[in-house]
Image (cartoon, rainbow, N blue to C red):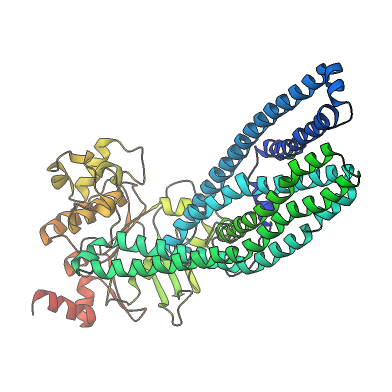
């Protein structure tokens, strides 16, 4: 994951990244920005026409006579004011709709891209990122990104368009009064800049607190059985309460940063009215300013004050976006370390199923000692290889190298004579059926779970593979048979039943290589015997690599490998290993009750 641990080394800046993801809606967004500029410039129309009406028809010399002589002009100015106000309302409405459409387009595109990116990551990625943190990135963080596109950018454009247009208009009317009013702007901008420096790290911390709280909630919900088994509900409630309290306190501290600055900005904004009364009043008395111009200034003073007030909130939201987008872009630009090689071999045909390890050593990226050392063995197509050994000796790590979940630090893993790092990942993994002791079933029907690897399977085929795994009998007794919906992670099924459905799912892809990691540990001996008989009589060729602890599972294997401390210490058939009198022979005696 190349983007990990880099502070800001992505190929695009945040705003460039947003622009990239507006593809197909960029023109609409440009029109939306132009619309924001236009409708804010139109804010000047009402004060402009009001000033003219006052000077010509209300306060000027001979105003009454002028009104009687030019009633049509008076009506025309009123209609223009009304018409332009209605037009401005229409532009605002269409503009807001455009911003929302573009923001939803960006949100949809990025969320899909992130999900695709997460799906294609390697095992190292999933051991690095917590589930709750990833959920935060595709929900809350993306909402901050959408808010940036739909609201923050519009507010920034609106503020600067309104201030600029008003400033130009004020200067055109009376530059002395204009500069008297605008002199407070640099002070407000300075305060906003200081606020930005203080609030930025607070938003980054707030986002981390939220991710941790989501992680705690996710782990608790996923592990609800363990919580109830140990009666730890009160402990978990207290744990979440502590996280929630921490998040609340950080949220309050972040809000208080703005509240410390808000009185200064509000005071400076209100100071504009005081300046207008004092300076504008003197100019009015001295005849340097007409009553209509004074009304125009008064009617537009908010156009300077309000954007200045809003800049603090805008900066607050921008910092929220900044913290969230950094986390989103970290995933967006991350690349898996395990991926197709540029010169990957194309093998669209079914694999023969030959597996060979040549002097393979392996160590996890966060480990200090090798998990596997100098592993060498070969499984010919159609053979059964059994792997046995004490817990922690590296059996599961070994089989994870075959579908290339991890890569060895030394040696080669070959399938059909080709190093797995030269095979296309999709083609390699489609030829491998994997069933593990820890079974994950989806919230779907039993039929859907078995046909997960091949959604085109017919009902008859699903039933056949269920028979191979000795699952068909208990499935037939369920309320809706194969259409019975199992809960998340297979809730409602026993451990043995879940294992049998998992085995049926692995067989359903008709793999060239079948890997079973203690898959029958939770089934009774009679059912295991039935499964072993089915595996010997599959209707398709298949190399089997089986991790097991029971001698009944391994005794008929073509080759049995005994692993200790990451190395193969014994190898041979059942009879050969008994004659050697080593670990396997002792295990046979132990399980026989001798």
**In which quadrant of the rendered view does residue 30 lie?**
top right
Instruction: Give 180 or 531, whichever is nearer the viewer.
Output: 180
Q: Position of residue 146 (x, y in %)?
A: 57, 47
Name the residue furthest left.
593
Q: Is residue 342 above or below residue 299?
A: below
Residue lying at 50% horizontally and 50% vertically, measured from the top left: 116
Q: Position of residue 245 (x, y in %)?
A: 40, 67
Viewer can see residue 126:
no
Viewer can see residue 55:
yes
Instruction: Give 60 or 429, whichever is nearer the viewer.
Output: 60
**In which quadrant of the rendered view does residue 543 lie?**
bottom left
Residue lying at 28% horizontally and 54% vertically, measured from the top left: 489
Residue 239 is left or right of residue 414, and the answer is left
Numbered circles on residues, count: 0
**In which quadrant of the rendered view does residue 378 lie?**
bottom left
Residue lying at 25% horizontally and 52% vertically, measured from the top left: 490
Q: Quadrant of the C terminus?
A: bottom left
Q: Position of residue 530 (x, y in %)?
A: 15, 54
Q: Quadrant of the N terminus?
A: bottom right
Instruction: Give 575 or 113, whichever is nearer the viewer.
Output: 113
Q: Is residue 33 above or below residue 334?
A: above
Q: Position of residue 527 (x, y in %)?
A: 13, 56
């Amino acid at each position: 994951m190349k983007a990990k641990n880099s502070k800001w080394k992505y190929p695009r800046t945040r705003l460039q990244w947003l622009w990239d993801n507006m593809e197909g809606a960029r023109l609409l967004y440009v029109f939306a920005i132009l619309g924001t500029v236009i409708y804010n410039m139109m804010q000047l129309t009402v004060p402009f026409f009001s000033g003219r009406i006052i000077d010509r028809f209300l306060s000027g010399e001979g105003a009454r006579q002028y009104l009687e002589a030019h009633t049509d002009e008076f009506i025309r100015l009123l209609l223009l004011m009304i018409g332009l106000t209605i037009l401005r309302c229409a532009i605002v409405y269409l503009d807001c709709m455009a911003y929302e459409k573009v923001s939803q387009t960006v949100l949809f595109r990025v969320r899909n891209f992130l999900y695709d990116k997460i799906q294609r990551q390697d095992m190292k990625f999933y051991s690095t990122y917590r589930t709750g943190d990833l959920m935060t990135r595709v929900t809350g963080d993306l909402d901050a990104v959408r808010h940036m596109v739909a609201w923050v950018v519009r507010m920034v454009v609106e503020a600067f368009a309104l201030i600029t247009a008003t400033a130009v208009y004020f200067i055109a009317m009376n530059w002395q009064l204009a500069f008297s009013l605008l002199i407070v702007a640099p002070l407000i901008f300075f305060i906003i800049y200081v606020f930005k420096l203080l609030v930025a790290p607070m938003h980054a911390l707030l986002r981390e607190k939220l991710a941790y709280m989501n992680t705690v909630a996710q782990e608790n919900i996923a592990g609800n059985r363990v919580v109830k088994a140990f009666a730890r509900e009160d402990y978990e409630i207290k744990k979440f309460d502590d996280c929630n309290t921490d998040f609340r306190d950080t949220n309050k501290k972040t809000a208080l940063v703005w509240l410390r600055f808000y009185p200064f900005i509000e005071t400076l904004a209100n100071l504009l009215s005081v300046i207008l009364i004092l300076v504008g009043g003197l100019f009015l008395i001295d005849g340097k300013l007409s009553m209509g111009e004074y009304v125009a200034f008064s009617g537009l003073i908010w156009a300077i004050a309000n954007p200045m007030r809003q800049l603090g909130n805008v900066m607050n939201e921008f910092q929220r976006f900044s913290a969230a987008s950094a986390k989103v872009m970290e995933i967006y630009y991350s690349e898996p370390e395990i991926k197709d090689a540029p010169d990957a071999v194309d093998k669209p045909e079914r694999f023969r199923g030959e597996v060979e390890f040549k002097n393979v050593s392996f160590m996890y990226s966060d480990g200090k000692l090798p998990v596997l050392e100098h592993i060498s063995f070969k499984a010919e197509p159609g053979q059964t290889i059994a792997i046995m050994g004490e817990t922690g000796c590296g059996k599961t790590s070994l089989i994870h190298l075959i579908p290339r979940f991890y890569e060895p630090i030394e040696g080669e893993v070959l399938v059909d004579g080709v190093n797995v790092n030269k095979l296309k990942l999709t083609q390699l993994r489609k030829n491998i059926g994997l069933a593990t002791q820890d079974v994950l079933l989806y919230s779907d029907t039993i039929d859907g779970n078995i046909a997960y690897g091949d959604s085109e399977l017919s009902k008859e085929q699903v039933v056949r593979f269920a028979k191979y795994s000795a699952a068909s009998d208990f499935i037939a007794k369920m309320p809706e048979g194969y259409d019975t919906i199992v809960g998340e992670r297979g809730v409602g099924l026993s451990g043995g039943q879940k294992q049998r459905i998992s085995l049926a799912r692995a067989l359903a892809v008709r793999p060239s290589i079948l890997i079973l990691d203690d898959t029958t540990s939770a089934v009774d001996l009679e059912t295991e015997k039935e499964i072993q008989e089915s595996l010997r009589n599959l209707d398709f060729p298949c190399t089997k690599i089986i991790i097991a602890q029971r001698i009944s599972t391994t005794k008929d294997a073509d080759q049995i490998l005994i692993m200790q401390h990451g190395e193969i210490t014994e190898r041979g058939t059942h009879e050969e290993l008994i004659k050697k009198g080593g670990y396997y022979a002792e295990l046979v005696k132990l399980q026989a009750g001798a």
